[in-house]
Amino acid sequence: MKISIVLPNLAGGGAERIHINLAHDWISRGLTVDFILMKKTGELLSLLSPEISVIDLGVNNIRHVILPLATYLRKSSPNVILVAMWPLTSVAVISWLLSGRNARIFLSDHEHLTSSYLKQNRVSSFKLKSSIRFLYPFANRVFAVSQGVKDDLCNIGKLSRSKVNVIYNPVVISDVPQSIYSQSSDYLWGADCKHRILAVGRLTIQKDYKTLIKAFLLLPSHFKAKLVILGDGPSKNEILELILKYNLHDSVILKGFIQDTYSWFRSADLFVLSSLWEGFGNVIVEALECGLPVVSTNCLSGPAEILENGRYGKLVPVGDSIALASAMIESLTQTHDREALMQRAQDFSVKQISDQYLANMFPEFA
């Protein structure tokens, strides 16, 4: 059985890591997996097993995907096509129709599309809604990474709720080499740091690091806290200006993109997600998997589902730096049942999530 995974590229994003992790699990079960990329680029290419073939469509524009993808599907004849992230999902359906519909096709959305596209004026409402409404029904099944993403898809695309299945993202940190054992906390954070606060994600408007930095400013000076942000992106200069404005260059550190984040999660005292919106919130699961306490905004969508409405971490209103600071202070001064946090993360294990995908894609073997 052959699965073809279609993605824009293998840049260092959550969706890309997830599909690499799932692909490795499927290979271990005897399946064949191809990655079909618009462009064979990205920091995560090196993580792929040699057993995985990578097909480069060699296109930069989403509109140019249709014909080369249709050609690949006709020649390669996969049993299953798994396409992630709108608008590639909609375009791939057209390719599949042109190729003769010989494979089963599954679409997976990892973003709250209303928040990510419509509220940010990144695309017209007509284009988003019509492409989902008219093309998604052709898919055998649509996967949403959270209940919030499912609700949004069904609303904007007028999809039948039975068409969309929620499959949460798997823990992806487990397969990263455990270099924590060779790097001490002092080495990573500095010996003068008393409270280590970690944030992980691209430097974009979505992550709202502006609110996080303002919240960090409100922490008592005797905390001797340090905030480390792992990630890169278009908002880097704006964030650096804010750090300089508040004279935080010694206590708020931008480390850039780091492939192996495991040592940082293991050595931190608190993980904070300050996003305006999410599709799921992979980094929250990664933090829980390391037994790391979490403070998150109660944004659409994902964090409240992962944290079970506050049972496994603190939730605060979006954009509220005072509430965020208060939750950070409480979390840093409380004791936590780290075993319970780690146990919660097991609900998102690669094996469990992989089983759910395979049961949907190959129901005859479920």
Image: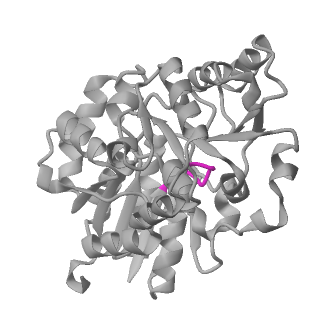
Residue 293, horizontal then vertical, whole percent: 54, 48
Stretch in magenta: 7-13
- The answer to whether one can see residue 134 in this image is yes
> On the picture, is 185 further left or further right than 62?
right
**107 or 340: nearer the viewer:** 340
Classify residue 233 by image quadrant.
Answer: top right
Majority secondary structure of the magenta segment? loop
**134 or 366: nearer the viewer:** 366
Farthest bottom residue in view: 30
The structure residue drawn at horizontal position 53% and vertical position 19%, both measured from the top left corner, is: 321
In the image, residue 189 sits, relative to residue 84, either above or below, namely: above
In the image, residue 144 sits, relative to residue 228, either above or below, namely: below
Q: Is residue 109 magenta?
A: no
Residue 204, horizontal then vertical, whole percent: 59, 29
State the quadrant of the C terminus: bottom left
**191 or 61: nearer the viewer:** 191
